[in-house]
Image (spheres, rainbow, N blue to C red):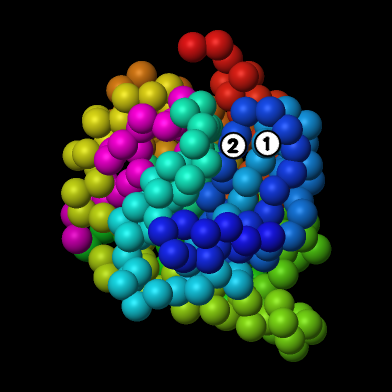
Amino acid sequence: METDVAGLRLEFLAAGQGKPLVVLHDQEYLNTAWPYLDLLAEHFSVMVPSHPGFGHSPLPENIDAIDDVAYVYLDLLRVLKRPDAGIMGLGVGGWIAAEMAVRCTSSVVRLVLVDAVGIKLGDRTTRDIADNFMLDDEGFLETSWHDPAAGRQTMKLPGPDVPEDELITLLRNRQTAALFGWKPFMHHPKLRQRLRRIDVPTLVVWGEADGIVPPDYGRAYAAEIPGAKFQLIERAGHYPYLEQPEAFVRTVLPFLTEED
């Protein structure tokens, strides 16, 4: 499916009924059904847009940074004309969601950030976020999954056994992720100080075995957002929604359905 946002045609998945829940995906992404989305769709009208430059969504010349994408999705909320949307951001999608929320939350009722990147904790010589662009497949799975064998079975990574159309999508995703997040690497220098502007209930969720951005990074993220809650998911790495989908939905569902 596609939708028009300020003249930009975005590819998206949609399922379920009820209050809208916009899910913003991470960089390692294929636009396809996943168990956690099916479980969320039992409670919400779930929409998963492919970011500009990801999947089959085009990348206009004037979009070359994460904050550009944040404005695209703020425009999307205006298109939806629903003042009660929940936003769930995963990894890089969490960075986008945070950039949205520090700008405007008039159409957002709840915010969930899952193993998000986007802030800088240490000094310029301290590595906060693992450079997954430099890892081979085995190193990537060891770093990002609690159970690398499960990751190998679940995730599709670029390689000779991947169908050509999916391989092109994965490589295009990486190219766009590098454009948006290479320098400075996977963060905005001013985002951390701006997180205090977020004024909607926020849940920060983290896999306890995340080696891309460790749990202490997540705790620091939550600490900067007024009133934010922090929850760990056991036996999960950077992708708890893929590695432990049932536990992930059990974690986020009470928060998303809680009455304000």
Q: Is residue 185 above or below residue 220?
A: below
Residue visible at 25% across and 46% down? 191
Q: Amino acid at mark 2?
A: Leu
Residue visible at 49% across and 12% down? 260
Q: Which residues are magenta?
A: 99-124
Where's the N terminus, which quadrant?
bottom right
Residue visible at 40% across and 75% down? 60
234 relative to 100 in the view: left or right: right
Q: x, y (%) of residue 198?
A: 31, 30
Task: Using the image as rendered, state which of residue 244 and residue 105 is in the foreground.
Answer: 105
Neighbour class for label 2 at 10 Å: few (<14), some, many (≥20)?
many
Task: Using the image as rendered, state which of residue 73 and residue 32 is in the foreground.
Answer: 73
42 relative to 181 in the view: left or right: right
- How many discs mark residues in the rendered view? 2
Which comes before the other along the chain, label 1 or label 2?
A: 2
Q: Which mark is residue 21?
A: 2
Residue visible at 31% across and 56% down? 67
Q: Is residue 112 above or below residue 98?
A: above
Q: CA distance from mark 1 to mark 2?
A: 6 Å
> What is the quadrant of residue 163 in the picture?
bottom right
What residue is disc 1 on? 45
Neighbour class for label 1 at 10 Å: few (<14), some, many (≥20)?
some
Numbered disc 1: secondary structure: strand
246 relative to 76 in the view: left or right: right
The answer to whether the residue labelled 1 contacts the one labelled 2, judged by CB atoms less than 8 Å apart, is: yes
Q: x, y (%) of residue 92?
A: 46, 55
Q: x, y (%) of residue 58?
A: 50, 74
| One can see residue 215 in this view | no
